[in-house]
Amino acid sequence: MGLFILRRVGVMILTALCLTYIVFFLTNLYPNLEKLAKTQGNFRMSDEAVASWLTDRGYLQSTPKKYAEWIGVVPSFRQVEEDGSVNGRCIKPGMKPEEAPHYCGILQGEWGWSSVSKAPVVKVLSTRLANTGYLMMWVMIVMVPSALIIGVLAGMREGSATDRTLSSVSILSTATPEYVSGVIFIALLASSKSPINQWLASNGWIEGKALFKGSAAKAMETPTFENFTLPVLTIALYGMGYIARMTRASMAEVMTAQYIRTARLKGVSFANVVVKHALRNALIAPFTVIMLQIPWLLNGVVIVETLFQYKGLGWELVRAAGNNDIEMLLGISVVSVVVVLLTQLISDIGYVYLNPRISVT
Amino acid sequence: MDPLSWGAIFTQILIQFTPVWVALIVLYTVSIRYKRRLGLYGKLFDSMIGMIGFALVMFWVFTALFAGVFDLIGTHDPVAQISGMKNKLPGTPVRGAEEGEFAHYLLGGDTLARDVFTRMVMGSTVVIAIAPLATLFAFMVGITLGLPAGYYGGRLDTGLSFLANLILAFPVILLFYLLVTPEIVATGLPQFMAVVLFVCPVVFFAVLIHSRFRTQPSKNIRWLVVVLVPLILLYLSLINESGSKIDFWPLDMFDIPGGTLVVFVSVVFVNSPTVFRIVRGLTLDIKTRDYVAAAQTRGERPWYIMLWEILPNARGPLIVDFCLRIGYTTILLGTLGFFGLGLPPESPDWGSTINEGRKLLSVYLHPALPPALALLSLVLGLNLLADGLREESLRD
């Protein structure tokens, strides 16, 4: 087991390095750097001015070297100016060159400066991450139990009317991407023009004009039922169907097993068979699926945060990508790659741990 | 002229779709009549879920066909702006409509005073043109790489699986943003990716034919020429675009409009690793069967075994996954449109129209809902179709 985890961690680190290198390479292509120079310096710079601006800041070194500097395993770029002063990536304004550290990369906690937020990437990213984490927590709280309940109820008696109905519901939910369900939810539940809200308001059952709010812009400080329900529901709905179908398949398989029949023949009640005998074995497969859904949820988070103006990681990704905020993009890619790989690792280890029939050697 | 009531709007929309209803009825009558002779396709008509799914899918395929090729169904020009129709409610009469012009905006006007109904109908042509083709390419890439990875195993398998996992661990939207920005397109990177990805189908067909007719040289050459010459010509004019990084081929038959190629490449790129994993898994399973051992004992070459013994026997799960994956590709295309990436801004595709409509959603409901429901019904249809196919193919 120890060796298995060690090998997986090794592959994981290699993958993370490759992925961040690809993002680094793509964000550091010359046209992007040129745009950066023009937005940071001045829009009417000539080509030579752009080149010298970039050279002064070490942007025109070879990509592997820049990447190593960014990671923090190679001393970072420095240049002695004509007047004898030294500048470089690690030397912040007001800092003497002799005191500045030689290494400043991701490993040293120096994630760079966000050109759009005008703040250190670490600071911006941590607040965004906290917001997204809070959103994801509620998504999980809503999604996982409801998906498992739907799956178990449907798989309990395969082919029954309950099964048919619940399976159709889960197919419908997997066919509804976030930008469709989000738009439908806003139109039906958050717009004062929607018939449902007009009916509710005319009866005096809701205080404002609509049941929910179509924007979660205030949910970062004060999350309320009104402004937080729709984003959570939208993300949860898309992931729910898939988990429910996996749970159903696994439950249906377990229910045909010999030991279930034995238990029934012994006279154990159906409810007891389901809860005490079947459930434990049926939940092994959904566990892996739930963990592997997290990267998918990240995708949904980007859409939902854009749709509801919730300032989390996804919202920041769209803003950074749209405004050529290179160091912020790199920071976001590091975070998301680590999240994806960690969930894969946990699901692998968890699967082996939960299912003793799987051998790792 | 008076605005239409909801009942009248509904009836009028049904009337507009007349060619589609006719085509659907003909297709279903013929298919159900001869279903015993049509193999797996015929069996689809034994399952209620499969029939509903197939009807939804074919509804949009016919809509795309009639709207895109014959210019039926739609009531106005999808990009024409008619003054005074901005954000007008469904059923509003067109101001100053002339004789022979359609007199109403059936589903209202959007923020640029274009007809929502026509844009929804024309949006289907974009999806139906790109999604199945992109999925097909992803399958070609996945099959060409997945078969040897599963069959040979060893280092090749380790390397290719690592690459596939690498792409799968990439946050899809970040990848899209990185690939689709104009700066990156200007460097020619998506085109180089197209060169690599689109060569897979050519290689696939070359190996497919050669492995079959290796022992009959004359037949071999005839087939290779017949299939490969058009394919290579297509391939070259596909990747070649005058004025870009790759511009060497004089006989450029067609140019893919700028953004579309990039969108196509990114969708294929994102989809192929999953296909690769499925094909590899199926190959690992099937290569232990007796008929593979028999072929090996006969002295067949590895590629013959892979393409003519293993692949045909893996078709069931692959067909089911193909349907599901078209649905997923449709969702991806919508995502791209939703973020305004790749496709031209005027494009009536569903993702872009949803994106335009959502900005004023709290005031005007009608521009965003039709494309959203259209996309939902197509993906739902594909999912139901896949479910029906799975059920029927398991019954064998």
Image: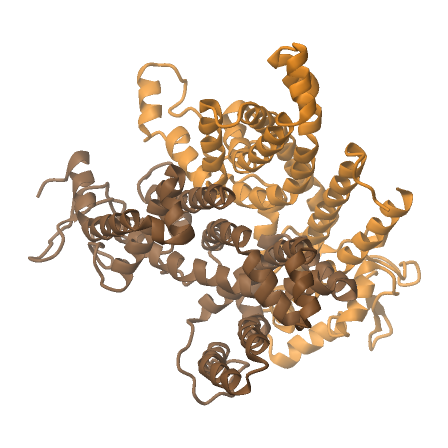
Chain colours: A orange, B brown
The relative height of residue B49 versus residue B253 in the rendered view (above or below) is above
Question: Farthest residue toward the left?
Answer: B99
Seen in the image, is B7 located left or right of residue B195? left
Residue A351 pos. (x, y %): 75, 38
**Relative to B281, A110 lies left or right:** right
User: Which residue is nearer to you in this view: A303 or B62?
Assistant: B62
Q: Is B41 rendered above or below residue B80?
A: above
User: Which residue appears farthest toward the bottom when viewing the image?
Assistant: B250
Residue B149 showing in the rendered view: yes
Residue at 37%, 41% (x, y): give it. B46
Q: Relative to the observer, which residue lies in front, B99 or B68? A: B68
Quadrant into which the N terminus of chain B falls: top left
Q: What residue is rendered at 55% in x and 86% in y?
A: B217
Residue at figure coordinates x 76%, y 61% from the top left: B158
Q: Position of residue B183 (x, y in %)?
A: 56, 69
In this rendering, is residue B55 above or below A143?
below
Left or right: where A355 falls relative to B355: right
| Farthest residue, direction right | A98
Q: Which residue appears at 66% of the width and 28% of the height? A: A282
Q: Position of residue A2 (x, y in %)?
A: 90, 43
Counting labels gives 0
Q: In x, y percent, where is residue B335? A: 49, 51
Residue B144 visible to the viewer:
no
